[in-house]
Image (cartoon, helix red, strand yellow):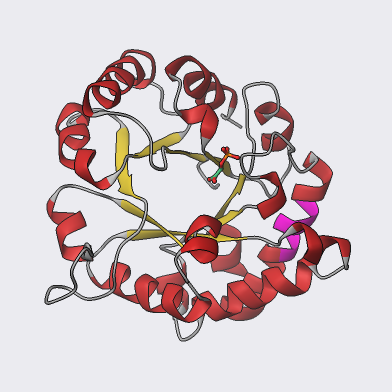
Amino acid sequence: MRKPIIGGNWKMNKTSMEAENLVRKLILELNSYEDVETVVFPPFPYLQKVKTLLQGTGIAVGAQNMFWEEKGAYTGEVSPLMLVDVGCRYVILGHSERREYFGETDEKVNRKIKAALKFGLRPLVCIGEKLEERKKGLAEKVVESQLRGSLSGLNPSQISQIVIAYEPVWAIGTGETATPQQAQKMHKFIREILERICGEKIAQSVRIQYGGSVRPDNIRELMDQPDIDGALVGGASLDAISFVKIVKYGGK
Ligand code: PGA
């Protein structure tokens, strides 16, 4: 049984006070809701504060990115050790916005995954095709190559620690969601590749989230698909009411 996991990726949003208000509302509504593993991904400056607020609740905290080195002269970077130190359990790696604007490649994602695992952080690895790629019939090829590149050199027990997020780039922040059937088809394909990489048992245990314009009104249909194990939510996670609805509808 794969426990559903729903993440709120706040991206570069919220002031410190707004972050606190949002988290307080989430605690009231979700503290004793255990059907879904819930994780919030605030910007770096608020991680510690959010973690303190969430201490003792069932809601976990993760970061939106990190560097692969433990420490050193890397101005502006944040290390896995620091994320663990402030209480993060997860880290998003390879988000399409990082790939698009900050030169993140599969090779870099791969180094980051290895570093995260070394420090006991669970990587949430994002993959997904762009619109042109889908139009050209290359969606599966792109997704397979991102998946294989990101997971290169990892053993099955390492892969079992990872969460995959399938996020078609054309669906992120656009209001255009993949249909549940389109998403299920790709999730099944991802699980088949995982099976070839690390065997059936691990492939069946890895959770694969869908991301891209997930809202309270489309989460149920997505979660009804057999290979969709959760969601990574951007815009709709910034509002407590809509994120709580998504998490509560996300139980299988
Ligand atoms: P969105 O973002 O829900 O705003 O489309 C999803 C994501 O980028 O993780």
Q: Residue at x 61, y 73 (%)?
A: 146
Residue 70 position by quadrant: bottom left
Q: Residue reaching furthest bottom?
A: 153
Percent across and percent down for residue 115 are 29, 74
Which quadrant is the C terminus positioned in?
top right
Residue 35 against residue 189 in the figure, above or below: above
Q: Quadrant of residue 54?
A: top left
Q: Is residue 56 left or right of residue 181?
A: left
Q: Is residue 67 above or below residue 14?
A: below
**The one of 121 and 156 positioned closer to us in this rendering:** 121
* Residue stretch rendered in magenta on the structure: 184-189
Residue at image x 28%, y 26%? Answer: 19
Dominant secondary structure (helix, strand or loop) of the stretch shown in magenta: helix
Q: Nearer the viewer, residue 134 or 81?
A: 134
Q: Is residue 199 visible?
A: no
Residue 116 appears in the picture as rendered: yes
